[in-house]
Amino acid sequence: MLKQRLLFGSLMTVAFAAIVIFDGWVDGSLTDSTPDKPVQGTLLCILIVALVVPAQLELAKLAAAKNVRIFTPAAMVASVLFATTWYWPQLINISQALYLSVLSAFTLSALFLCQYVSCGTSGVLANCGANYFGICYLGLLSSFVLAIRIDFGLWPLLMFVSVIKSSDIGAWAIGTLFGKHKFSPRISPGKTWEGMGGAAAAAVLVALLFAGFCDIMYWPAAVAFGLCFAFIGQMGDLAESMMKRDAEQKDSANKVPGFGGILDIVDSALVAAPFAYLFFKCRAY
């Protein structure tokens, strides 16, 4: 399991980096020598959509274990529209705030309609609440990944994702090898304080490497970034663990060796993405 986790975790991180770098080369944002094209992050946008769709199916499976109905087609469409929030203003004259406001209102109305057609008055609060939660969890949170790419560039995005995934790998490796003191036994018995230390060490190291080679920030800020997002990333993992434990499921699926499902791969990055956007936004002033 440890070898699989390390192998597939590293391969997925490298593959993601390759897609983002190629995306930057296509739209001109990779280097300063070529002018930026007006539309940025197209390949990343497609990748996010490709992850959101199966993740919704996994979330629907978890909800079904609690007798909650996810209106999958509507939830998928809404999640994709939320996830691509920062992409559309590059094509049409609309602000992200207006886009989100209108989309939120129409999504809620659509969920009520789906509830009426599918279930009538049975489980209105549970079904509509779970659907809207899933849309925000997968769609709204993932939109900040694309936001980091479009507003701050591909290197800050790669720094964020690399720090999060390296902290995951560090936590798993050190926790598996040396973990003794439980971090959150009620939610995730496998997590330990030793693993948290491994997550912090790996995250700080990767953040310092990006700070040094990509000139994103000074080293004190990189240390703070690594420490903060090692912790926030683990909180994101715990958030998904709560859902799985409530549904009495070990993993959201069994598609990726050593990890489980798509939700098990993206959980830490989803919760951390808005905080990373805020971190980079504050750094811009």
Image (tube, grey):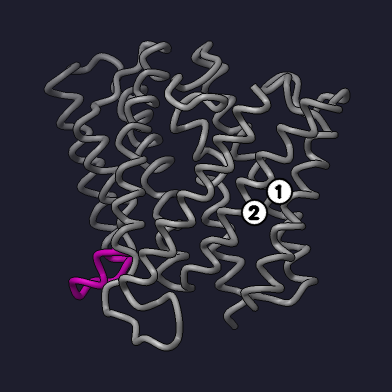
Residue 113's spot in the image, x, y percent? 15, 31
Quick one: label 2, few (<14), some, or many (20+) residues within 10 Å? many
First in sequence, mark 2 or 1: give its number.
Answer: 2
Whether 92 is among the magenta residues is yes
Q: Where residue 13 is drawn, which disc sits there?
A: none
Quarter of the N terminus within the rendering: top right
Task: Give the residue number, with chain letter if any, for mark 2.
Answer: 163
Q: Where residue 230 is drawn, which disc sits there?
A: 1
- Distance in Å between CA atoms under marks 2 and 1: 7 Å
Instruction: Answer with left or right where residue 214 lies relative to residue 60.
Output: right
Instruction: Name the residue located 61 percent from the left edge and 66 percent from the top edge.
Output: 279
In this rendering, which labeled residue sits more in front, label 2 or label 1?
Answer: 2
Q: Are discs 2 and 1 less than 8 Å apart at CB?
A: yes
Q: Is residue 223 above or below residue 176?
A: below
**Local SS, label 1:** helix
Q: Nearer the viewer, residue 280 or 70?
A: 280
**Local SS, label 2:** helix
Q: Nearer the viewer, residue 169 or 230?
A: 169
Tally of numbered discs? 2
Residue 213's spot in the image, x, y percent? 66, 73
Choose top left, top right, bottom left or bottom right for residue 7: top right
Whether 1 is among the magenta residues is no
Q: Which residues are magenta?
A: 87-98
Instruction: Name the residue located 30 percent from the left edge and 17 percent from the top edge.
Output: 123
Residue 224's spot in the image, x, y percent? 76, 63
Instruction: Name the residue located 36 percent from the left edge and 48 percent from the top edge.
Output: 48
Quarter of the C terminus within the rendering: bottom right
Quick one: label 1, few (<14), some, or many (20+) residues within 10 Å? many
Residue 177's spot in the image, x, y percent? 82, 26
Instruction: Answer with left or right where residue 139 lies relative to residue 222.
Output: left
Q: Which amino acid does the dot numbered 2 rest on?
A: Val
